[in-house]
Amino acid sequence: MDKKAFASCMKKNRENKKISIEDLGTITGISYQKLKEYESGEFDKIKASELQAIGKALDVPLLVLMKGGGNVHFLKEDEDGVKFCEWVEY
C-alpha cells in the first residue's frame, strides 16, 4: 500500500464529507493521534480492522482507500430494471 496515496485519499474524502478528525475518531473508535498519523502517511502499520472502519466511515470502498483514490465503476439498475453504469470518484 502506498502510504502517501492512502493518506491523501483519506484526507480528501474526510474533508469532502465535512468530518473532523475528532468526529472520525468517535465514529471509528480510533484515537485522534493514530488518525493524524494515518492522514499524514507517517505510520508503520495499520490494522485491517482500522482500515475497514475508516473506509466504512468515509463511505470509500476498502480497495479504493488502500490504492489511494480513483474512479470506481458501479453497475446499477433503475426502477424499470434498466441497467446502467455509474462512475464515482473517490
Image (cartoon, rainbow, N blue to C red):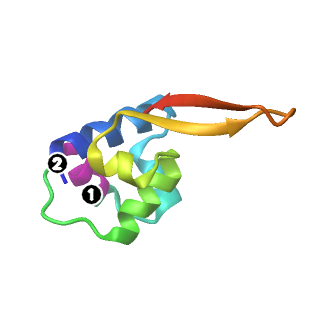
Q: Any mark on residue 55, and which?
A: none
In percent of width and height, residue 14 lies at: 43, 38
Tell me the SS state at disc 1.
helix
Q: Amino acid at mark 2?
A: Asp
Q: Residue at x 36, y 61 (%)?
A: 51
In percent of width and height, residue 22 lies at: 43, 49
Tell me the SS state at disc 2.
loop
Q: CA distance from mark 1 to mark 2?
A: 20 Å
Image vertical order of residue 27 relative to residue 48, above or below: above
| The C terminus: image quadrant | top left
Q: Residue at x 17, y 49 (%)?
A: 3
Residue extending furthest toward the front = 82
In the picture provided, is 52 more to the left or to the right than 86?
left
> Depth check: 16 or 35 in front?
16
Q: Residue at x 44, y 41 (%)?
A: 20
Q: Amino acid at mark 1?
A: Gln
Magenta: main secondary structure: helix
Q: Any mark on residue 33, and which?
A: 1
In percent of width and height, residue 49 lies at: 39, 70
Q: Magenta span covers which residues?
A: 35-41
Q: Residue at x 30, y 51 (%)?
A: 66
Image depth: mark 1 or mark 2 in front: 2
In percent of width and height, residue 4 lies at: 16, 42
Mark 1 and mark 2 lie on one chain; the one further toward the N terminus is 2
Q: Is residue 38 magenta?
A: yes
The quarter holding residue 31 reads: bottom left
Residue that label 2 marks: 2
> Depth check: 25 or 80 in front?
80
> Depth check: 7 or 69 in front?
69
